[in-house]
Image: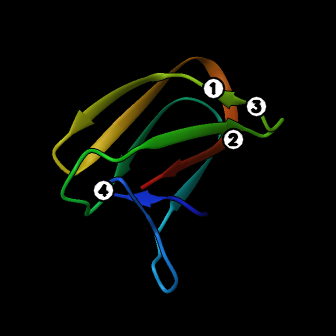
Amino acid sequence: MAGYINGRAAGAGGSIDTNEVSFINTSSVTITHSLDYNPMIWIVLTTGILIDAAITYGSGSFTISLSTPLSGTIYYR
């Protein structure tokens, strides 16, 4: 995944690690991470649709709350 780090394009040899967590037929997902910041999050349904959801950040974790049980993948970095 190409991207930016602190406003600069990630150049040759640069990388941005993206984590992913799949979920199946659920309306709430809590993910624990070791990042020192609140990550950017993308939620993509199994149909390929990118959706918005309520996200609550905690210390070293975040919880995604959906209005109905869905399936897909959460990407974060």
- Residue positioned 78% across, 40% down in the render: 46
What amino acid is at disc 2? Gly
What amino acid is at disc 1? Ile
Residue 21: x and y, percent?
55, 54
Q: CA distance from mark 1 to mark 3?
A: 6 Å
Mark 2 vs 4, N-terminal side: 4
Badge 1 vs badge 3, beta-carbon distance below 8 Å: yes
- Label 1, on which residue? 51
Badge 2 vs badge 4, beta-carbon distance below 8 Å: no
- Label 4, on which residue? 6
Nearer the observer: mark 2 or 1; the answer is: 1
Q: Is residue 35 left or right of residue 25?
A: left
Mark 4 vs 3, N-terminal side: 4
Residue 41: x and y, percent?
46, 41
- Label 2, on which residue? 72
Residue 74: x and y, percent?
56, 45
What amino acid is at disc 4? Asn
> Which color scheme does this rendered protein use?
rainbow
Badge 2 vs badge 3, beta-carbon distance below 8 Å: no
Quick one: 69 or 2, which is closer to the camera?
2
Nearer the observer: mark 2 or 3; the answer is: 3
- Label 3, on which residue? 49
What amino acid is at disc 3? Ile
Looking at the picture, does residue 53 appear above or below residue 40?
above
**Secondary structure category for the residue under label 2:** strand
